[in-house]
Image (cartoon, rainbow, N blue to C red):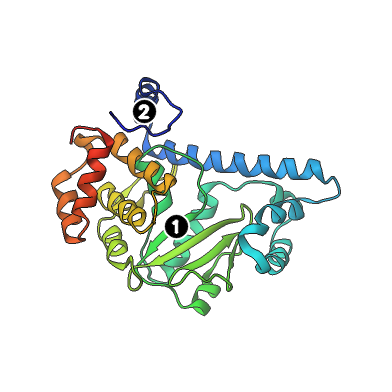
Amino acid sequence: MEALLSADTPLETERVWLGMLRALPPARRVAMAWDWTGSAINIGRLNASTQNLDSDAHEVALSRARFRYGAAIVRLAEERRRRLSEAEAKRFPSLQEVLWPLLSALEALQITAVPLSLAIPFYGVHRALGDISLAVERLPERQALQQRLPERFWLDETAEAEPGLRLVELQSLLPVWLWPADSGDNAALLRLLLDSRRVTPLLEEAPPIAVPSPEALLLYLLAWQGEQEATHDERWYDFLAILKMQRPSGLNLELLRTLARDLQCLPQLEEALARTGLEF
């Protein structure tokens, strides 16, 4: 039985849907994912504002983010009010506004980065993004990063997820994670993602950006899922979506299996391929 992307979607419906998505340029799928994110955030803010008519745009947005940032919300509120006008606080930014300044800052610090969370809709099915994750060669020195960091970003000094570094984009309030390839349990996988990068049109009407290969991205998702005590629905969805969208003809299966063998996760890969029900 072929594995479904969604438990409540009939297989024939899914096949039609995937066919429609395959006909779209990959950058359009990324744009759609970002649009979904903005719509979800704006709907949440609208609901919060209608429940409390005395709240302004800043207060509504921060009330939605309180569960993410805990005690840091006070400092985040100060940063947000200092940097954003009321009109800016109400508007969801374009992906170009968010991604380009950050990539430019890292490039100025001579740090190579590839977007992980954006590569998922690029190669697979688009869905709302919960964050922006970047694999980087190394973490920037904090003071140097602060000097280069665009005004729209806030460096979260309270984040405890080492060795990663968390930023917050103040207009959308989305977290932006930097994951270094020179330390940590996933260093080998992150290094693979960086080494496999290819320049491609990730964003519509913008210069090309380096993204990881689909083979390296699949192994990263598989290894991440393998660290969990139980199957993580979102990561399995991402893994399955990339497999189905790319199909055997769009993947270098020999390379995929070689990389999995080097990373000692070939049995997990073969099991995952079998579970999709696709003919690989």
How far across and down, in percent of the image, does residue 145 sit? 50, 73
Q: Position of residue 20 (x, y in %)?
A: 38, 25
- Whether residue 208 is situated above or below residue 243 in the rendered picture: below
How dense is the environment of label 2, judged by Cα within 10 Å: few (below 14), some, or many (20 and up)? some
Give, as a three-letter code, the residue at label 1.
Answer: Ser
Label 1: few (<14), some (14–19) or many (≥20) C-alpha neighbours in 10 Å = many
- Horizontal and vertical percent position of residue 218: 29, 49
Q: Quadrant of residue 112?
A: bottom left
Query: Label 2: which residue?
Result: 18
**Which SS class for mark 2?**
helix
Q: Secondary structure at mark 1?
A: strand
* Most foreground residue, 2 or 187: 2
Question: Which is more N-terminal, label 1 or label 2?
Answer: 2
Contact? badges 2 and 1 (CB < 8 Å): no
The C terminus sits in image quarter:
top left
Relative to 86, 221 lies left or right: left
Q: Nearer the viewer, residue 249 or 9?
A: 9
Give the quadrant of the N terminus. Answer: top left
Pick out the residue farthest to the right.
54
Q: Which mark is residue 182?
A: none
Q: Nearer the viewer, residue 28 or 235?
A: 235
Q: Is residue 40 above or below residue 191?
A: above
Q: Is residue 207 visible?
A: no
Name the residue located 38 percent from the left edge and 61 percent from the top edge: 135
Q: What residue is rendered at 60% in x and 48% in y? A: 93
Q: Is residue 44 placed above or below 98 in the rendered structure?
A: above
How many numbered callouts?
Answer: 2
Would residue 161 appear left or right of 215 to someone viewing this image? right
Q: Quadrant of residue 121?
A: top left
Q: Which residue was labeled with disc 1?
A: 133
